[in-house]
Image: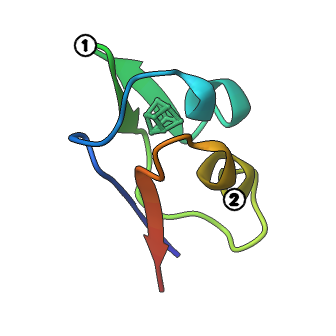
Amino acid sequence: MKLSLNSVTCIGCGLCSDICGETFGMKDGKAILKKKVCEDNGREKEAIISCPTNAISVSK
Ligand code: SF4
């Protein structure tokens, strides 16, 4: 699955990088993607669900 991140709606809470630091990082107060694809059942899914502003999305 392909990951994408909306840097406008991201509020920089850091939750995604806390949950899944191998895929999400923080830079200048916003989340960044360390990789652009993830497994269907990876920890990325928990990060996506936990994001308070739904700034992370996935597509096939
Ligand atoms: Fe941004 Fe969402 Fe990550 Fe928080 S969990 S840093 S709002 S992408």
Secondary structure type for disc 2: helix
**Residue placed at 50% from the left, 21% from the top?**
13
Q: Amino acid at mark 1?
A: Asp
Q: Which mark is residue 28?
A: 1
Q: Position of residue 19 (x, y in %)?
A: 71, 33
Look at the image and name its color scheme: rainbow
Count of residue discs: 2
Disc 2 packing (10 Å; few <14; some 14–19; many ≥20): some
Tell me if residue 22 comes above or below residue 56 in the rendering: above
- In the picture as drawn, the residue positioned furthest to the left comes out as 8
Tell me if residue 8 comes above or below residue 59 in the rendering: above
**Residue placed at 37% from the left, 27% from the top?**
11
Of 31 and 9, nearer the camera is: 9
**Residue placed at 45% from the left, 64% from the top?**
57
Of 53 and 20, nearer the camera is: 53
Tell me if residue 29 comes above or below residue 1 in the rendering: above
